Image (spheres, rainbow, N blue to C red):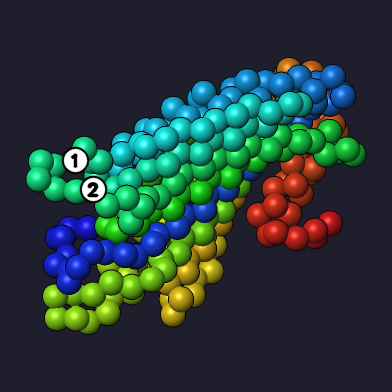
Amino acid sequence: MEQKMRLYGFNNLTKALSFNIYDVCYAKTPREQKDYIAYIDEQYNSERLTNILTRLTDMIGATVLNVSRQDYEPQGASVTILIAEGSMMPVQGETQVAHLDKSHVTVHTYPEYHPDTCLATFRVDIDVATCGEITPLSTLDYLIRSFDSDIITMDYRVRGFTRDVDGKKLFLDHKITSIQDYIDREILRRYDTVDINVYEANLFHTKMMVKEVDLQNYLFNTDVYELPPKTRLEIMDNLRREMIEIFSGRNIY
């Protein structure tokens, strides 16, 4: 926000960002699929995810109140961070009122693989719910670069209302026409992007799919030049089909 808005009372708007990413990889044998899942599980364990979310919390100017994290068997991890706007240190002569400005950040990972096409998919879901002036949209560039994903879907919604000093209801306290407004142009150039927005409900949806696919980046423990041309084309076709269906949210092929 360029200029702090003068309000009557406190800002009770709730802002929720749901950020979902998908990475697709080709793993030819059951052993390679298992190794890929193990690799992803180690790379994005609960400790690393906690570091990402803690950095995110710092970026939005919130205070970490509590961290809960868990690694699962056979795979996957979850982290939940309870946060508050600003400092929770008591000011002399004042009483802290709890739970009015509590918010949270969560992340869950879901590694899995396709039974027929030798494709493994890694999905991460991040949810950021904030109250008051804090908006999680400023963290999108950081999140996208942290995971460098093939498909990204984002939902942002503002709920509730507050009032200005004249008593007028405010259902939105910052300008937004699209989630893309908060994403670096260099990042956007790498993706095909679609918006579905419901402005009357302050509901914004954006989905992105990477434009260029370098096959080598999608092979696990395999060099692209070890594969015959026909196999390369088949893998590329399967990769694109998988991405298009995830991006579209429906079975197409």
Residue 106 higher or lower than 77, as above or below: below
For image coordinates 27% across by 57% down, the residue present is 133
For image coordinates 14% across by 60% down, the residue present is 3
Q: Earlier in the sequence, mark 1 or mark 2?
A: 1
Give neighbour class at mark 2: few <14, some 14-19, many 20+ (Cα, 10 Å): few
Q: Which mark identifies residue 90? A: 1
Query: Along the horizontal axis of the image, is 196 left or right of 185?
Result: right
Q: Position of residue 220 (x, y in %)?
A: 72, 23
Separation of disc 1 and disc 2 at Cα? Answer: 6 Å
Residue 106 higher or lower than 246, as above or below: above
Q: Position of residue 235 (x, y in %)?
A: 79, 36
Q: Is residue 109 visible?
A: yes
Give neighbour class at mark 1: few <14, some 14-19, many 20+ (Cα, 10 Å): few
Q: Position of residue 144 (x, y in %)?
A: 47, 41
Q: At numbered mark 2, what does the secondary structure look like: helix, strand or loop?
A: loop
Q: Is residue 148 visible?
A: no
Q: Position of residue 241 (x, y in %)?
A: 76, 49
> 110 or 246, which is in the foreground?
110
Q: At numbered mark 1, what does the secondary structure look like: helix, strand or loop?
A: loop
Mark 1 is on which residue type? Answer: Pro
Which residue bears the numbered disc 2? 96
For image coordinates 45% across by 64% down, the residue present is 157
